[in-house]
Structures are given as structure tokens and as C-alpha cells.
Amino acid sequence: MTMKLEDEARRQLVEAATQVRRWAYAPYSNYAVGAALLTDSGKVYDGVNIENAAYPTTMCAERVAVFKAVSEGERRFVAIAVVTSNGGTPCGSCRQVLAEFGIETHVIIADTAGNVVQEATVADLLPGAFLPSDLARE
Ligand SMILES: [Zn+2]
């Protein structure tokens, strides 16, 4: 069952993700990403991509937002907005991290012109996700 996301909540999340992009640390790719994660307590945690000269240690905006929320005691998410210059979608690692905390979380993908280019659930974006329930013992 997909939770309905109000238009105003969607607009605010996209706006928050757009605004936080300014703090992206992306000197190598020049591809700034902003994310804003709405939890079921009503709080919003934002995140940006943080690159590193040792490339594999780079972290994505979506995971920064999720990790900030989880480290503050939040584990139930309603939606995440991700804003890039061209409406790029979350990478596989971010999809997997989002799946851990809710396969039905809404993912709103927007560009910096304010266009929502795609809206889907994590389940839509990561079919066949490996979930906590897969570790259940017999
Ligand atoms: Zn990612």
C-alpha cells in the first residue's frame, strides 16, 4: 500500500533538496546532488554528495540524509526527494540502503528547474531487493 504524499509535502521536500545542493562537495564530478528525507515523525533530514580524492570513499547525498536520520533515532521514512541538474536517479547502493528502512518509501526525483521527472517507490526502483526479512532464520 502506497502512502499518498501531499502536494505541499512534495513541494517542500523538493525545495529542501534543491536548497541543500549548495553544500555539495563535488570538486571532481561537478555533479551536485541534494537530498531531503521526510520521516514519519515529520522531520526532514537533508544530505549532499561528499566526494573524496580517494574516489571510492565518496558518499551520496541520499545516504548522507538516511544516515543522519538513523543516527538521530529515525528509522521510518515517508519520502525522499533527490535533486540534480538533470534529474539523475539514485544509485544502486542508495536504493539498497533505502530498502533497508522501507520498500514503500516514496522517491521523488527532480531537476534544478523544479520539474519532478520521476516519482516511484523504493520497490519500483529496486525490484527483488534483499531485505531484512531475507535474513530470517528458519
Ligand atoms: Zn547513491
Image (cartoon, rainbow, N blue to C red):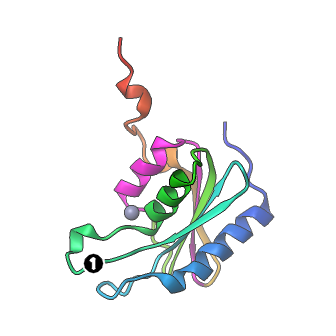
Residue drawn 65% across and 79% down?
114
Q: Which residues are magenta?
A: 90-112
Residue 105 lies in the magenta-colored region: yes
Image location of residue 11, percent across then percent down: 73, 70
Q: Nearer the viewer, residue 121 or 132?
A: 132
Answer whether residue 123 is visible to the viewer in this image.
yes
Where, by quadrant of the figure, is residue 7 drawn? bottom right
Q: Amino acid at mark 1?
A: Asn
Question: What percent of the width, then of the height, locates residue 112?
Answer: 58, 83
Q: Quadrant of residue 80?
A: bottom right
Q: Quadrant of the N terminus?
A: top right
Q: Is residue 91 above or below residue 111?
A: above
What residue is disc 1 on?
52
Q: Residue furthest front?
A: 72
Q: Please name the residue shown 35% across and 16% down the image.
A: 137
In terms of image quarters, where does ligand 1 lie? bottom left
Q: Residue at x 40, y 67 (%)?
A: 60
x, y percent for residue 89: 45, 65
How far from the left and from the top, in percent, is residue 64?
A: 46, 64
Q: Residue at x 71, y 44 (%)?
A: 3
> The C terminus is located in which quarter?
top left
Tell me: residue 76, above or below residue 86.
above
Q: Secondary structure at mark 1?
A: loop
Residue that extends furthest to the top in the rendered view of this protein: 138
